[in-house]
Image (cartoon, rainbow, N blue to C red):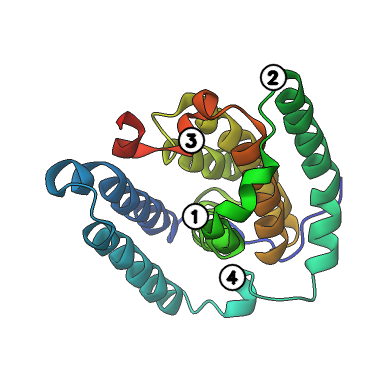
Amino acid sequence: MTEATDAIPADANVAPLAGWEIVSVVSSLLIAEWVVLVFVGRSKMVAAIPVGLAFVFMFCSHRLHRETLKEIGFRSDNFVPALSWLLVPTLIAAAAILIIGWSSGGLRFGLIPARPRFLLLPLWALAQQYVLQGFVNRRAQMALGTGVPGVVVVATMFALLHLPNLPLSAATFLGGLVWAWVYQRAPNLLAPAISHSVLSLLLAFSLPPAWLNSLRVGFKYFG
């Protein structure tokens, strides 16, 4: 196993704050997925309020910890190592999705041109990886150090945000483990965003919609 680079050592003085920061951000996103939509309907503009507050909080936290964009993962110098570590697991997952989709008759790639919103998938994946790795992973390392405990925390938070869609939560937990492990060794956000985009697209257009309830999560899962 390649040794981690740019590792963040655990700090007992910072650990409580880092843990609270993770809980605060994840709670805000869960509020957007569940509470806001329950009480005010399906308005995306209203749901964007807690999401926006979460991003403001993360920005302030980065300033507090004096983190640079490069440290967070907006960089290119370690893109190739990160992508190389992700290549095999991404190909294995992609092959598994395609085989399952083909055997179940779920392949629907002809629908992609009719769904222009999927053109924004790379940006959406990058935003999710920023939250997942650039914030949650870094805070988990501050609290627990580099290694398995922090990786599991990241994957668990990601799966939690995809409930009550159990198949999708399981898939995101596995993906979260791989992306978090790679990020701790090469803190780059573009590489996991590419992997995330490819696998999300395959899930959306390879498996029967009923299996993943059209990728719905939170309150939207129920209708």
**Quadrant of the image containing the C terminus:** top left
Residue designated by label 4: 72
CB atoms of marks 2 and 1 within 8 Å? no
In primary-sequence order, the first of circles 3 and 1 is 1
Q: Is residue 92 left or right of residue 203?
A: right
- What is the three-letter code of the residue carrying label 4? Ile
The answer to which of 78 and 119 lies nearer the viewer is 119
Q: Are marks 4 and 3 in contact (CB under 8 Å)?
A: no
**Residue at screen point 40% across, 53% down:** 22
Q: Position of residue 210 (x, y in %)?
A: 50, 24
Give the mark nearer the N terminus: 4 vs 3: 4
The tag on residue 136 is 1
Query: Which of pointers 1 and 4 lies earlier in the amino acid sequence?
Result: 4
The three-letter amino acid code for the residue at tag 2 is: Ser
Q: Which residue is mark 2?
A: 104
What residue type is disc 3 on?
Ser
Vertical arrangement, residue 171 with respect to residue 116, above or below: above
Q: Residues within 10 Å of mark 3 (few under 14, many from 20)?
A: some
* Callout 1–callout 4 Cβ contact below 8 Å: no
The 10 Å Cα crowd at callout 1, few under 14, some 14 to 19, many 20 or more, is many
Q: Which residue is mark 3?
A: 214
For image coordinates 43% across by 79% down, the residue present is 63
On screen, residue 29 above or below 209: below
Evaluate whether residue 148 shows in this view. Answer: no
Whole-number angstrom distance, CA of label 2 to CA of label 3 = 16 Å
Q: Earlier in the sequence, mark 2 or mark 3?
A: 2
- Work out whether 133 lies above or below 148: below
Residue 3 as seen in the image, left or right of residue 184:
right
Dot 4: element = helix
Crowding around mark 4 (Cα neighbors within 10 Å: few <14, some 14 to 19, many 20+) is some
* Mark 4 vs 2: CB contact within 8 A: no
Callout 2 touching callout 3 (CB < 8 Å): no
